Image: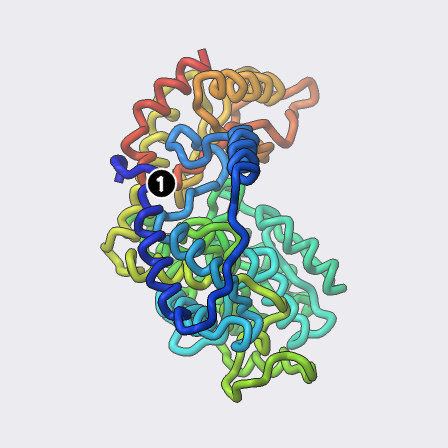
């Protein structure tokens, strides 16, 4: 894989494009405008402007959750863009609508759903919006509850939907505190609980299997936000608690996953799934102009979004064909490799007195740490300077302000009144590329240089 070049897919794309064009060869010629010297110059300027980016595709970019799309996804997306299908309806995207249905069914099978209703979306935010909109239809006026480590979008979405939002404290490992949740549930005001399987800050996994037990007593909906971590259901090296949470995912009422994260897809490609197919009743509409040339169900009838890129469906479908979602297969091994890289880096950090690590190991492929110092403020200053210096050595990390309670007790000296700040600036790394495990020595060497 390391021998492949970013443009190696282009000859394959040209061949596939020729094959696609043959399907329309019987039509009268319709010459397209040629791209001349001006276009070439503009593309060169565009390439130069795009150099003002971090090297997201390189293993030395180990900061935010940015993973390059697989070459086959790039090729299939570009191929479909020559048709530019719209998967809002069969008229606008006949072939890619079929590909979307197949691709979404593949994701549903990965989660163990026996039946489902679902579709792709422009991303996880809109997919979560749809899931919580349905939750509001079923439990009108009732609150949405999520962990204080859940993505901020759930609070915003609740506001958009005019539904109350309740933030549930997290425990010392960043997972939803079950005792605090049950206390909130006793009010009878919560209609939906959001379980995050892979928080975007630290990769913590909420105890979904225990939420299912609570649901039997308190009768709430469970929505799983697995936008980041969903594909880890295939990983073979999860700790027992995380494994139990992922094994329970088929019992959730709705699930969101982002193929544009670990699914190797271009932006934007999200997916929402409902366990109960009759949820489609909430989407009914009578638009007189919405492409009813077919009596078959079209995707516009089960989506709040209208226009959606059919190219996303083509790219996802092609990637699934090349890298099936098979336990123990290449796709699954790549996920396990990311977690192993995070575990190994965590161990190196824990053994070095320059750094302070949380008392728990990474649950997925995200880890965080800060610099050893007497106070959180001093640790924060050192974390910022290390982040800046690492970038000068071409190691790109991320920063996150996190609760000090995630670190072991007595990590820092207490202040004059026996207290210290509630938060500390941390370095954060997302080791989501399969190559990160092989590049760990390079990452470690540059980090040590930056920290010293």
Residue drawn where x is 47% and y is 44% of the image: 203
Rendered-image quadrant of the C terminus: top left
Q: Is residue 253 visible?
A: no
Residue drawn where x is 74% and y is 70% of the image: 141
Quadrant housing residue 222: bottom right
How many marks on residues?
A: 1
273 horizontally vs 156: left or right: left
Q: In the displayed structure, would residue 384 be above or below residue 101?
A: above
Quadrant housing residue 42: top right
180 horizontally vs 331: left or right: right
| Nearest to the observer: residue 71 or residue 434 | 71
| Nearest to the observer: residue 30 or residue 331 | 30
Give coordinates of residue 216: x percent, y percent.
Answer: 51, 73
Mark 1: few, some, or many residues within 10 Å (few <14, many ≥20)? few
Q: In the displayed structure, would residue 107 be above or below residue 439?
A: below
66 horizontally vs 148: left or right: left
| Nearest to the observer: residue 89 or residue 132 | 89
Give coordinates of residue 131: x percent, y percent.
Answer: 59, 67
- The type of colouring in the image is rainbow
Q: Disc 1 designates what residue?
A: 7
Q: In the displayed structure, would residue 248 be above or below residue 63?
A: below
- Residue with the most extreme bottom position: 295
Q: Is residue 31 visible?
A: yes
The residue tagged with tag 1: helix, strand or loop? loop
Residue drawn where x is 53% and y is 41% of the image: 201
Residue drawn where x is 50% and y is 54% of the image: 227
Q: In the displayed structure, would residue 275 be above or below residue 169?
A: below
- Residue with the most extreme top position: 452
Quadrant housing residue 429: top left
| Nearest to the observer: residue 227 or residue 315 | 315
Give coordinates of residue 363: x percent, y percent.
Answer: 40, 45
- Residue with the most extreme left position: 328
């Amino acid at each position: 894989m390391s021998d492949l070049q970013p443009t190696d897919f282009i000859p394959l794309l040209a061949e596939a494009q020729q094959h696609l064009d043959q399907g329309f060869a019987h039509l009268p010629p319709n010459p397209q405008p040629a791209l001349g010297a001006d276009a070439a110059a503009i593309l060169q300027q565009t390439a130069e402007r795009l150099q003002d980016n971090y090297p997201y595709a390189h293993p030395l970019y180990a900061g935010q959750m940015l993973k390059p799309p697989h070459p086959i996804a790039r090729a299939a997306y570009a191929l479909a863009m020559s048709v530019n299908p719209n998967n809002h309806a069969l008229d606008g995207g006949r072939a890619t609508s079929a590909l979307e249905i197949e691709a979404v069914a593949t994701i549903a099978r990965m989660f163990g759903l026996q039946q489902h209703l679902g579709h792709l979306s422009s991303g996880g935010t809109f997919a979560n919006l749809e899931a919580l909109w349905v939750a509001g239809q079923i439990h009108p006026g009732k609150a949405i509850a999520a962990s204080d480590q859940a993505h901020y979008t759930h609070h915003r979405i609740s506001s958009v939907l005019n539904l109350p939002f309740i933030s549930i404290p997290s425990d010392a490992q960043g997972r939803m505190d079950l005792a605090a949740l049950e206390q909130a549930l006793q009010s009878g005001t919560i209609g939906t609980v959001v379980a995050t399987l892979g928080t975007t800050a630290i990769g913590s996994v909420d105890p979904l299997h225990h939420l299912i037990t609570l649901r039997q007593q308190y009768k709430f909906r469970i929505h799983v936000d697995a936008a980041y971590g969903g594909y880890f259901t295939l990983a073979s090296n999860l700790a027992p608690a995380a494994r139990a949470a992922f094994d329970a995912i088929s019992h959730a009422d709705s699930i969101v996953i982002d193929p544009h994260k670990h699914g190797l897809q271009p932006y934007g490609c999200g997916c929402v799934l409902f366990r109960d197919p009759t949820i489609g009743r909430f989407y009914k509409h009578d638009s007189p102009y919405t492409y009813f040339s077919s009596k078959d169900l079209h995707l516009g009838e089960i989506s709040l979004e209208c226009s959606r890129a059919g190219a996303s469906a083509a790219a996802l479908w092609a990637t699934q064909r090349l890298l099936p979602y098979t336990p123990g297969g290449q796709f699954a091994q790549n996920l396990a490799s990311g977690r192993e890289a995070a575990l190994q880096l965590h161990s190196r950090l824990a053994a070095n007195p320059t750094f302070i690590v949380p008392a728990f190991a990474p649950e997925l492929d995200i880890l965080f740490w800060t610099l050893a110092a007497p106070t959180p403020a001093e640790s924060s200053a050192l974390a910022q300077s290390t982040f800046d210096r690492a970038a000068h050595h071409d190691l790109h990390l991320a920063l996150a302000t996190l609760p000090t309670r995630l670190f072991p007790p007595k990590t820092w000296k207490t202040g004059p009144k026996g207290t210290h700040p509630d938060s500390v600036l941390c370095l954060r790394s997302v080791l989501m590329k399969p190559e990160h495990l092989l590049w760990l020595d390079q990452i470690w060497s540059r980090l040590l240089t930056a920290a010293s």
